[in-house]
Each structure stands twice: as structure tokens, then as C-alpha cells.
Image: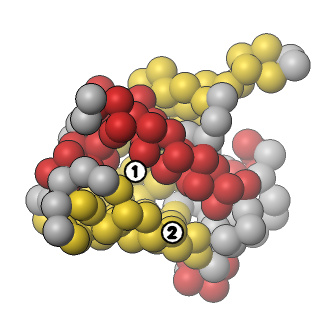
Amino acid sequence: MTDTRDLGSVVIERLFDAPVDLIWKMWTEAEHFKQWYGPSGASIRTATMDVRVGGRRLVCMEMQTPNGTMQMWFTGEYREVVSAKRLVYTESMSDENGNVVSPTDMGMPEGHPDTTEVTVELEDVGGRTKMVMTHAGIPADSPGGIGWEMAFDKLNAYIEGQNR
């Protein structure tokens, strides 16, 4: 396994005008997660989430391209679950059955790790939520880093819709 620390990390801090419990649900309940995850133009067709240490996750992201619909599947395992505080899970490209697929087979550059790790830390700041997300194993300037920024914009818009 590649040491993801050597490849860099995307670290994003956001302040959401929503309570910690709501932001936690956005990360841990499939019906909410499907509404915001992925870059602009992406939709989540499948999100299976067994949020407990050792539990598995399987996510299918779809995007329309000039050549038709493109699907990307991701699988992983929850490593740490501290309700409304900290969530740590692995992420690997996969097939629809959750079998890990080599990143180079999916068109990623040579050296991209088979498995990366996402850490989400939440903190109550006067009824608002400070979120720090670290995705270890991908460089900050990678498409994945840009995708996270777009996803969090979608998350913010989705939360605003929930608060109406």
C-alpha cells in the first residue's frame, strides 16, 4: 500500500450555518449524502453507508460527458466514528460490487494510491459548525481537491434549503 502522507493532502476548513448534528447527518445518512457529494454536475446514484468502525461504504457518482454517462464507483471502510465529532474512512476506486480497481485502470496518473483516507472533524461554534476535512493521499491541486470545494458549495446550498 502506498503511504498516502507522501502524496499530499487536501485540507478544507468550512464554517456552516447549521448545528453539528445536521452536518454529521450530511456525512452519515445516505439520503442526505447523495444530495451534495461530488463536484458540480455530478449526481450520486448509489450511496450505501454502514457507519460503524469496520463498516463498509459504496458510492456511485455519475456525470454526463460528451461520450455519454460516466460512472465512478468508490468503496471504503469506516476506521473511526465518534458521533457528531470525528469520522475517518478509507476510499478506493472500485467496481459496482465494491471490489477495488487500480487507479491507473481508471485513468488516474501513475503513482495514485489504491486507497486514500478521509477525516472529517466537526466542532460546535456557537450553534454553527466548523468542519475540517482532510483527504490524505491526493495533492491539494488535484481534480479531487477542486471537486471537494465544489461539493462543499453544494452542501452549503443543500443545508440552506433544509433550514427554510
Q: What residue lies at 50% left-to-right and 39% top-to-bottom?
A: 154
Query: Residue 97, labelled with which disc?
Result: none
Q: Position of residue 41 (x, y in %)?
A: 66, 29
Q: What residue lies at 42% left-to-right and 24% top-to-bottom?
A: 46
Q: Residue furthest top?
A: 68
Q: How is the image coloured?
A: secondary structure
Q: Position of residue 163 (x, y in %)?
A: 25, 35
Quadrant in the picture for the N terminus: bottom right
Query: Closer to the observer: label 1 or label 2?
Result: 2
Pointer 1 residue: 76
In the image, 116: left or right of 164?
Answer: right
Q: Position of residue 32 (x, y in %)?
A: 31, 32
Quadrant in the picture for the C terminus: top left
Pointer 2 residue: 12
Looking at the rendered structure, the kind of residue marked 1 is: Gly
As measured in the structure, the alpha-carbon distance from the residue carrying label 1 to the one carrying label 2 is 20 Å
Q: Judging from the image, what secondary structure is the residue with disc 2 in? A: strand
| Viewer-nearest residue: 124 or 134 | 124
In the image, 19: left or right of 110?
Answer: left
Q: Which quadrant would residue 144 be assigned to in this image? A: bottom right
Q: Residues within 10 Å of mark 1 (few under 14, many from 20)?
A: many
Q: Residues within 10 Å of mark 2 (few under 14, many from 20)?
A: some
Q: Which quadrant would residue 143 be assigned to in this image? A: bottom right
**Is residue 62 at least partly visible in the picture?**
yes
> So how many labels did they put on this image?
2
Q: Judging from the image, what secondary structure is the residue with disc 1 in? A: strand
Q: Residue furthest bottom?
A: 6
**Is residue 1 at least partly visible in the picture?**
no
Q: Which quadrant would residue 146 be assigned to in this image? A: bottom right
Q: What residue lies at 64% left-to-right and 36% top-to-bottom?
A: 40
Looking at the rendered structure, the kind of residue marked 2 is: Ile
The image shows residue 108, relative to residue 32, as above or below, that is below
